[in-house]
Amino acid sequence: MSAPTVVAPRPARRGTLKQRLLGPQNRNLWFWVFVGPFLVGLAIFVYVPILWSLYLSFFDARNTVTPTDFVGLDNYKFMLTDPAFLSSMGTFLVFAIFIVPVTFAFGLGLALAVNRTRWFQAFFRSAFFLPAACSYVVAALIWKMSIFNGFRSGVANGLLGVFDIDSVKWLSVTTPPWYWLVLVTLRLWLQVGFYMILFLAGLQRIPPILYEAASIDGAKPGWQTFRYITFPQLRATSVAVLVLLLINAFQAFDEFYNILSNFGTYPPYARPPLVYLYYVALGSQQDLGRGSAGAIILAILIGLIIVLQARFTREKKS
Amino acid sequence: MSTPVLGAERPVSSSSAAPTVVRRTGIQRPPIERFGVAVRTAFLVVGALLFLMPFYLLIRNALANRREIVGLKFTWWPAELQWTNFAEAFSSANDVPMGRAMVNSVIVSVTQTVLTVVLAAMAGYGLARIPFRYSKLISGTVLATLLIPSAVTFVPTFVMVSSLGWVSSLRGLIIPGLFSALAVFLFRQQFSDFPKDLEEAGRIDGLGWFGVFWRVVVPNTGAFFAAVGAITFLGSWNSFLWPLVIGQDPSSWTIQVALSAFTTSQTVDYSQLFAAAVIAVLPVLVLFLALQRFIRQGYESTGSTG
């Protein structure tokens, strides 16, 4: 054949620069074909923005992404002393205090019940899991207009009407803060099926032989086996569920925004961190400097939760 | 090393493991146990009814008139079914462009699902199987992004997207969400467990790296692709914060943003709003029920809502 040889015979030791770049059998080339597109995207849409935000957080960047006015740590100082920021942390804490234990308990309870039932197991599992397919926007719509509206046509007030109790204005009064009931039940409905699935998977990983052994040893089914076998065996799942619940509560936005904002304005109370951040960074001021500082503070807080969890799980394992 | 949020102690598909219930085959149960069964069943039945109630309300409202939705009395079922609500909700005479929003949502979710899965599967395979000197380092970098909560990055990403001039565009809605470190991590794990012998066989038959991936690995991990795809689609269809941030012009609203604008606007036609909501939810519910097994397996292996 007269065609020019494309592949030169392999040299004894190191190849040309081209060959070394391509690696044996063009492996390096193929690596970049497979991984390259993703990495480039990740760099452009995750890493560069984060670094850019870090940069912006040291500048007075109102309505601009190329600021010139260096302010040092002022944005951080402002955020950490802003009463609205602190109260958004308070809102998160109150929300977490309700939603975390309640969802945990219901998720575990449903998983135990569904796991043991012999009738229509698949139906029950689907019924509890189905809300996970619904969006927070639609759920907020149902909750706001049909369950917790101020009239007897709302399910909640209709139910109160059966017992001759006066209608409650669930969303327009702040004392007592009934809106928490609306927010917590909504998130519980939408999320608990997901956690039930995690617990069910955990339950199925427990070796049946443990229960057989316990029953031979005379342990009564019910509380005793739950307390000494099921619950300890679910430890890893439980820790993961708790952390997920916390992180997700921290990032709550959709239901707060859709339930509480009216005619385009959000009330000054009950602003969780992301709602607060949304109004700082994208409100009338478009203060991207302070917004960036806030985003970085929140990211660090969430990172702390994850690191603590990793450490906690590792210690217990060893 | 750095575990993701849920310690994925085991690869997928452990769900076929034996059930934990030690079933009693006796004919007579002791009374206390029968009582327990009754309580459990009652708990499940009442719970299931409560959990399905919002769906019932949604459908009832979509077919009702205004007075039946927010009137002074609870209505079990509309006296006259208002099927016209659906047509009216999507008519062009509306202030809120529902039809356009629906089209936007379909384009965004489908594109995002397909591209996310393709990008993540390729990257996952490359990291799992193609030997490269810095492969570990790159995996570590990708894993590190799992520590950054997606919601918090909306400010940085907005900075990026607005300087690219992508605000209020489909590009701005779709592209920033395509690079899911979680999906890459899952695929990498899945492909690491893939039997090497099969790949070797393909290679002997003359397939290259891409051939092995496309003709041997992908066809044998279809269920996993379905799981990641379904979860991505759900997340994309239901996402709200990012489309709200980016959709400053109504022509780029997704269905969720449009519904939200309807919900929080002054002149609300409740019936139409609910009709639109039914159209926004029904397709996903059907998809969810059809792919439930995959979605469950996906969630079990990630433990993350993404």
Image: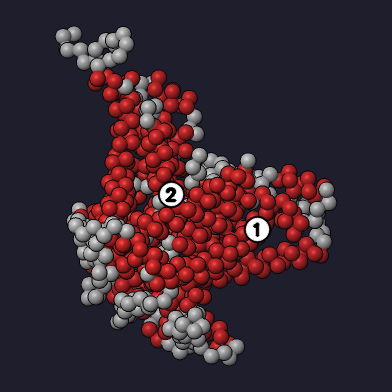
Q: Is mark 2 on a helix, strand or loop?
A: helix
Relative to B183, is A10 on the left or the right? left
**Crowd around label 1: few <14 · some 14–19 · many ≥20 (10 Å):** some
Image point (33%, 30%), residue name? A31
Indicate which label's residue lies in the foreground, 1 or 2.
Answer: 2
Residue bearing mark 2: B147
Instruction: Determine if residue A50 is in view.
Output: yes
Of residue B128 and residue B20, the one placed in the foreground of this image is B128
Q: Which residue is drawn at 51% across and 60% down?
A: A246
Where does the image place residue B242, in percent across and percent down from the top left? 32, 60
Residue A121 placement: quadrant: bottom right
In the image, A282: left or right of A303? left
Q: What residue type is labelled 1?
A: Leu
Label 2: few (<14), some (14–19) or many (≥20) C-alpha neighbours in 10 Å: many
Q: Position of residue B251 (x, y in %)?
A: 22, 65
> x, y percentage for residue B267?
30, 82
- Is residue A160 depicted above or below A9 in this figure? below
- Nearer to me, A315 or B235: A315
Q: Do the CB atoms of the residues marked 1 and 2 lie less than 8 Å apart?
A: no
Cα distance between the residues tagged 1 and 2: 31 Å
Question: What label sits on residue A241 in the rendered view?
Answer: none
**Above or below for A54 versus A61:** above
**Protein chain holding label 1:** A
Is B112 situated above or below B258?
Answer: above
Position in image of residue A153 (x %, y %): 47, 84
User: Is residue B169 shown to the viewer in this render?
Assistant: no
Helix, strand or loop for disc 1: helix
> What chain is tagged by disc 2?
B
Look at mark 1 in the image and give the residue it sits on: A112
- Residue type marked 2: Leu
Identify the residue shown where x is 71% and y is 45%: A208
